[in-house]
Image: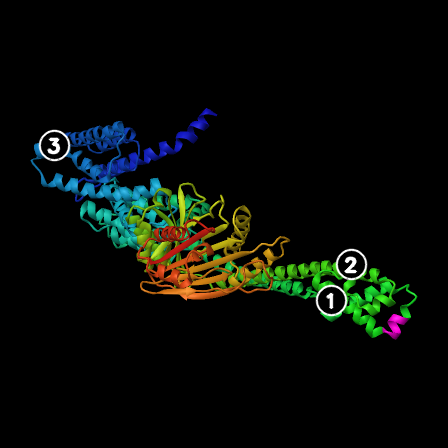
Amino acid sequence: MKKINFCKKYGFSILKYFLFFVVFFVLSKASIYNLIFPFAFGLFFALIWCNQKIYILAPLYIFACLVSDFSLINCIGVVTNVFIAMILFGLHIKLKKPIKFGLFSFYTIIAQSGFLLAQIYFNNSILIPILTIIIGFCFMLACKEILQVFLQRGLIYKLNIVEIVCGLVVLCAFSDGLCSFNIFGFVVVKLFAVFAIFMSVYVFNISTSILLASVIGLGGLVASGSTIFIAPFVIWALIASSFKTANRFVPVISVLLVEFCLGYYINIYNDYNLIAFAPIALGSLIFLTIPNTVIQKIVDYCHIIDNNMAMKSVVNRSRENLCKRLYDLSDVFGEMDYVFRSMIKGGMTKEQVKNFLIGEVKDKVCADCAEKNMCHRMCIDETCGVFEALIVSALERGKTSLLDVPPYLTTRCSRVSNLVGAINQLCAQYRQYAGVMNNLDASRVLIAEQLSGVSKIMKNLAGEVNKNISFDNNKENVIINELSYNNIICSDAVIYEQNADVVSATIVVRKEDSSKNKITEIVSKVCKNKMIITSDNTSTKAGWNVLTLKTAPKYDVIFGTASCAKDGSKISGDCYSIIRIDNDKFLLALCDGMGSGEKAEKTSSLAIGLVENFYKAGFDNDIVLSSINKLLSLNREEIFSALDVCVVDTRQGTADFIKMGAPNSYIKHINTIDTISGGTLPLGIVQDMQPIIIKKVLNVGDMVFLFTDGITESFASDAELEDYINNMKGLNPQILAEELINISIKINKGAKDDMTIIVAKIFAIA
């Protein structure tokens, strides 16, 4: 059990550092024309930069280099290299000071001082060691880029062009080192090349296979100046790709036959025998032993971008299905709207009410009277006229009395008192019944309006998802590459157009990179639009954030507010709200409850809460205000509120003013002012009332003023208030709001009513 736990805990680390040792050993053999050996120390310092343990790397590096070349100069160079590196980096670790890459690069050069001095002293050479240091430093940069992919970011994410080039440079150097291993004609680089080519053929496309084959062959050219490997390796890639089938024996046999012909009949290697053929055969055999399931997993792992394309297709199909379902739901809510409206009964006409109550009075008072025939046959017109007059009096005044009964009926009828009492009772019952029926009908109308509103919302949503999303793969790749250049690791990016004016981008970046300003700058440049971040959410994968960016609107808004309670009142009866109802629209709402104090505050707070929720849900202006009005009018208590709403569209540069019983609002331009008037009654007085909706175009620098009647009543007239606002010189909306409150209090010598003001300023987004 302990052995199993040890393997789980340390197995990967042991394998990793063993591979580092192998690569150190191979790169220590790699050279440029067998004169310059710059590659091993470049890998050593790149691994240090990637936070690998220096106390483990140091002995591995020393041992690998000394096994490769146990000369005095090499010993001095390698040991001083490691010694200086451990001293410098150890000091930073001890002092807990991070190393910036510029300083790290300087340390890398300083660490080569022992190698440089040894070359000058023993070989009297300065050009070769300087070239070795320069080339080794450049190789360290390439190793750093590709090691960050393997050790920090992970291979699951697409490589950018710089990382691809750096990877090819490292592959070329590794192949260079393998070319030096020639055991009695058994050339190790051929074994590596044929295996790598077969794997690339089955994992990537033909162009990638030819590129890898060329780079591996280039390693031999760098090492010896000979092109002997480039042509055969490229031919292997072409043959393997041409004969690629599900049966892997076909391309393997094809390559082996071509290699045999090239070596034996064409004699491109000058000296060809069975040992020279053995590495190709062994590499092919190793490839054949790999299970198909393993190769398929590698294919799936490397083709994450293709999977993204499939996922994008699924997104569009899902949007089509969602659109259909939304339309179906819209029809359902539309039908429910029709059903509720058909349930509205409506009230009886006045004539129907009078006839109904006359019949009820006859049944209740006159049914068992001995003079019934006299009154309702011989004098029917007079009797019905008296009954009708008494009923009308009771309905209009609330009750009737004996004084309303004509004298000729009083002298003739012995049940006048009963008649008056019955009429008052029946009229009271009818009024109660009529109130219930009216409330029922109003409730049905309210529900029907909400259902109609939901139906419209469903149709609007269906319209938004009706079109397929157009993805831009080229821009996605450019964004990933550009972000990587700026040390912002991006694992994925999706660019699509919502419409002709709006482009959306969703990118996945490391959590520590998500707040960098460079992200919006790069995405804006690639999308050729000013982009803003609209959301920043934690990804399901730990350590990553999902950023959503969208084409910035033309304008934005800043706000200022000020309020004051009526003198003697602890709580203001005014309420206001400033919220973003979507990415492009702001809602400014101001409500003045009837009276002042706690009761008025509750009234206005209720109205403001309804306004916020209706608008955030996406209901139209007409439905929002009429529904709120009906809800308030259904309350048993009298709840009246003046409501002032302004919806600012920052993308279109417009404002919708919706007023119900509210005082004038103003738009202050640079030198002029617009007045927005509203003449409807406040909320809650009558049910069937439509708000006044006025649309205005806004320009940069315009200011919108909304306020309650506590402000307007402080001035002698609307014209005086308009002139005062037009002559205000400030540019800060908060200062202007406070100034207007202060001048109103000064004019009134106190706060005679609750006062609240909202000032919004429009400005252009740079």
**Amino acid under label 2?**
Gln
Amino acid tagged 3: Ala
Q: Residue furthest left?
A: 124
Secondary structure beneath dot 2 equals: helix
What is the quadrant of residue 356 in the picture?
bottom right
Q: Nearer the viewer, mark 2 or mark 3?
A: 2
Question: First in sequence: mark 1 or mark 2?
Answer: 1
- Residue range highlighted in magenta: 374-379
Q: Give me the residue at 64% from left, 61% from top.
A: 442
The amino acid type found where label 1 is placed reads Val
- Percent coordinates x, y for residue 606 in the rendering: 55, 51
Q: Nearer the viewer, residue 332 or 42?
A: 332
Helix, strand, or loop for circle 1? Answer: helix
Tell me the crowding category of disc 1: few under 14, some 14 to 19, or many 20 or more residues within 10 angstroms, Cα based: some
Instruction: Classify 749 as above or below 470.
Output: above
Pointers 1 and 3 in contact (CB under 8 A)? no
First-in-chain label (2 vs 3): 3
Examine the structure image and report whether residue 376 is included in the region drawn in magenta: yes
User: Residue 395: percent from the left, percent from the top?
Assistant: 72, 63
**Label annotation for residue 392:** 1
Residue under numbered circle 2: 425
Give the x, y percent position of residue 547.
40, 50
Residue sitting at x 21%, y 51%: 227
Q: Nearer the viewer, mark 1 or mark 3?
A: 1
Q: Which quadrant does the C terminus fall into? A: bottom left
Residue 118 badge: 3
Residue 241 in view in this figure: no
Helix, strand or loop at disc 3? helix
